[in-house]
Amino acid sequence: MDINVAQESTIKNLFSTFLTKDEQICYFSIPLYQRKYSWSEKQWEELFSDLCHSFAKADMNTDYWGNIIVYKKDSENNYELVDGQQRIITLLLLIASLGSIEKNDGYLPLKFNDEQNSVWVKIAENSRLTQDEKRHPFNRAKNYFTTLVSEKEVDKQALLDHLLRTKISVIIVNDELESNLLFGRLNTRGISLNDVDLIKHSLFYATERRLPPTGDDVVLQKWNNLVQTTSQMNISIDEFISKWWEIHYELSEHSLYTSFLDELDTSEYLNFLDSLLSVATEIKELKINSGTDNKIGRNLKWLLKISPSRQLLPIIISIQETSFGRHAKVSLFELLTVFEFIRAISPQTDFSNLEEEYLRFSKTLLSEVTGKPLSEREIMVEIKKLKVKMRELLPDLEDFLNNFTKLRWDDSDRWEGSGHEKMLSTYAIYTLNNWLDVINHGAGAEYRTRDDDEYSIEHIRAKKNATNGELSPEYLIGNLVVFEKQPNNDLGDVDVGEKISAYRKSSYPQMKELIFKNKRKHTQSYRTKYAMEWDIKDFTIAAIENRGRYLANAFYDKVLELLE
């Protein structure tokens, strides 16, 4: 391995001259396997304070940014930041707050290899941000520096010029595996390595010395695959490894890393990594659900979106790693998704006991309690125990009706429950339609387990009637129905009377239920008695409220059925 410790470079040259080699324009990149940007006010304040301190003393040695480690393949035009990404990102954000980030022949000096790049480009180019993007750590850091500069009344241009004169050393490594090992041996300023960082570097360091020099970086490849796989599920590598470990081993009273060192011999490291990658890949494939419907993917996708549970991942992992009946697995994933939806819309209910039950169930399923594999019958007993706990925590019908009927197709955070209200409303409407979409065949009746590609949300009573914006009844769940995309787009925002003929052509059973009273549950007198009836030709605000109660009752009835 060649390690080239570069001459000290000024920050100005680091982002310009250094990135121009033999007429090739390069940029810094953040590898996918690196942790996300994790600096916050404490580190921002320290960095800014250091800069201002040196700025106030012209004779002070400004070489204090330390080292960064980069890896570069000869065939590529980017330097991967193996160590120092937190400092480099923060320095660029500080530059952006003081002036602007200079491009080098059209290239920004830093590029991300994931969804963060679009936010980064907008901030670097001072473009308009969405509300979510405004809350991103990049933007919060930039705003933090902007506020500090204003409060301290410093000369922005003079401070920027000083920052660009400060220095940093660059260590260039031409071997990707060794660059990661070097990262583990260096102690640089910033946030200390977490347990998963330490596990990662133990894996790299130990296995590199056990494996033959085949020329294939097996560990690096597996690690990168694991990071990419968990990222595709919107799960951090830290969370995945921590939760996997929690249900397979006893955690040390000190740390996850200590437990890792206590439980595994170095000869087991590669098998450990293989186990992580195997179950992560299986869960990802279940979620993607390509080809023949696996009857789990739809619920798994929604479950990962909906659930606030810290024990969600352990229960998903344990189900996937345990062998039992296919039908029972399908039903269990549906039950979990439905119950986590109820949890998300029930802020008054204390579900802390459910967290304990999830963890107990996960560890028992993996035989961590019994010490031997569970039989199919024993697994069914454990599922029944889980259902008992869910029934204990299930809100009563009145509370559920109250929460469900308040759901809006809106994400303005005005509701007392989840901030993802539009998503929750969409899930509920799609799910209710799926339960109605029954196919009868020789094996019995089955309902739809996959959302149709043409699903879209239709507002029955036109949104133009919403006199109070998204607080109006027209945005309540009782005014929502699933409808094919094309006719929905073609109709536009018109009154119900102008849409009924198009509604009649829909193939979705929920639309038929909306239009035809004989397609609804219960008798008409029962629905009228309990304020769950409506007339499509006169779909008033009262009709929205009645239909909301009807949908809530239908959902609650199905939950009780799943809990049997």
Image (cartoon, grey):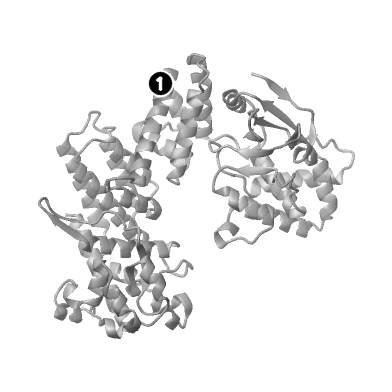
Q: Quadrant of the N terminus?
A: top right
Where residue 234 sits in the image (x, y, percent)? Answer: 45, 46
Q: Is residue 165 above or below residue 1?
A: below
Q: Is residue 465 above or below residue 14?
A: below
- In-front residue for pair 99/496: 496
Quadrant of the rendered structure where residue 181 is?
top right
Residue 251 showing in the rendered view: yes
Where residue 408 sits in the image (x, y, percent)? Answer: 40, 70
Instruction: Give me the residue at 26% from left, 66% from top.
Output: 508
Where residue 348 sits in the image (x, y, percent)? Answer: 36, 64
Q: Is residue 407 above or below residue 32?
A: below
- In-front residue for pair 134/13: 13
Q: Quadrant of the C terminus?
A: bottom left
Residue 312 left/right relative to 230: left
Where residue 307 sits in the image (x, y, percent)? Answer: 38, 53
Q: Judging from the image, what secondary structure is the residue with disc 1 in?
A: helix
Q: Which residue is mark 1?
A: 268
Residue 343 left/right relative to 204: left
Instruction: Give me the residue at 36% from left, 46% from top.
Output: 288
